[in-house]
Image (cartoon, helix red, strand yellow):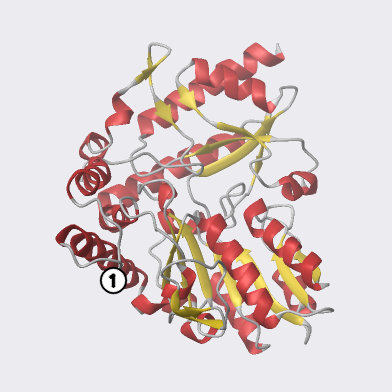
Amino acid sequence: MTVQEIRNEFPILSREVYSKPLVYFDNAATSQRPRCVVDKFTSLSLNENANIHRAFHRLAVDATEEYEQTRRKVAEYLGCSEKEIVFTSGTTNSINLVAFSFGEAFVKEGDEIIVSESEHHSNIVPWQMLCSRKGAKLRVIPVDDDGYLRLDVLESLLSDKTKIVAVTHISNVLGLVNPIPEIVSVCHERGVPVLVDGAQGIIHQNIDIQELGCDFYALSGHKMFASTGTGVLYGKSEWLDKMPPYMGGGEMINSVSFSGTTYAPVPGKFEAGTQNINATPTLVPAFELLSKLNNDAETTDRMKKVTRYLLDYFLSDPRITLYGIPKKASDKIPLFSFTVKGAHHEDIAILMDKMGIALRSGQMCAEPLMDRFATTGMVRASLAHYNTMEEAEYFVACLDKAIKMLTK
């Protein structure tokens, strides 16, 4: 696909902001929606709107088939069994589910949970809550000055008390790809399962769960072109089968009486209540488009060039400090968090917005990482498959203008 063909699939990219063409560089927060996703959601809402798994009338049967077909397609894309796919509202919900259910089954007072210094709050706070509830201890893998995880420290942190390690696939601040297979191998040698926050990984990597080897993988639909409020938790059956339900309600049961309740088999026992029946199936067209783009030579080559161009710019401008500096090109996705000497991060973002460029500024839900790098906040530019070299060049020109306005 040419870049223009890709952009034509995303109607919002043709809008203007302050009489200037929109340059959307906030994809790490949420991606834009392609027509195929909007069409799927609209079609289901208008033609097959019924509750699933509950009735035998035609609408309910059709809605149920759409939902379960989505599970089959997602499992096929990730390379796992459909019984290992649990639908959630997003990465945050997926991690909270594991933190609660795994914690109830396997964590006791004195045990330890390991996370990394580069985690999003969604992969810190649920584990803190578990530790508080169980009397366990949270231990942290530090990052070095370039943003890489200190894997030597991970090995020293692992012990007989370690119950699970939770790490991000790709940091939403640093944009560095973590060596998940290596981390998993180190942890599995000690019998420790690994959860991976795949919110950023799913959009920029072809995910093969078997190759990664992790025990849990969490992702959000809205990061990868699907509807908001959709998400996936992959979990190995050996763990999911032993974990208690996260929530109770309809459809997650086998039988209910006042003398006791038995639960449905996985994945049903983790999907209580009415699911996001019109939105979850949008994962199918989203995954299909994502797979097409990630395996399209022209698209991947273009994104590599754009990433290299922006990386060279950030590293060459003495006014700018870039966080997440790759040792090799394949370690970096097109995500750049930076600060400007003498300028506040919010002021940079506001000025850039006036020039039509959408960026993120602040702590980016990673306050411990801000503390690690001794800053109150950063500016982040994050790109997706539909962004162009022309947009990158315009961004550089506008950023130079903004810096001059704020630091003269």
Q: What's the residue at 58%, 49% (across, down)?
A: 172
Residue count near mark 1 (Cα–Cα under 10 Å), binned few <14, some 14–19, many ≥20: some
Amino acid type assigned to the residue bearing label 1 in the image:
Arg
Instruction: Residue 343: tell me if it is visible.
Output: yes
Q: What's the residue at 53%, 77% (across, down)?
A: 215
230 left or right, relative to 150: left
Quadrant showing the C terminus: top right
Q: What's the residue at 48%, 45% (across, down)?
A: 334
**Residue at numbered disc 1:** 72
Dividing the picture into quadrants, the one containing residue 51 is: bottom left
Q: Position of residue 140 (x, y in %)?
A: 77, 65
- Residue toward you, 56 or 41: 56
Up the image or down, 320 lies above or below 114; here it is above
Residue positioned most to the front: 258
Dividing the picture into quadrants, the one containing residue 104 is: bottom right
- SS at mark 1? helix
Up the image or down, 163 lies above or below 148; here it is below
Dividing the picture into quadrants, the one containing residue 138 is: bottom right
Q: Position of residue 250 (x, y in %)?
A: 44, 67
23 left or right, relative to 60: right
Q: Position of residue 400 (x, y in %)?
A: 57, 20
44 left or right, relative to 17: left
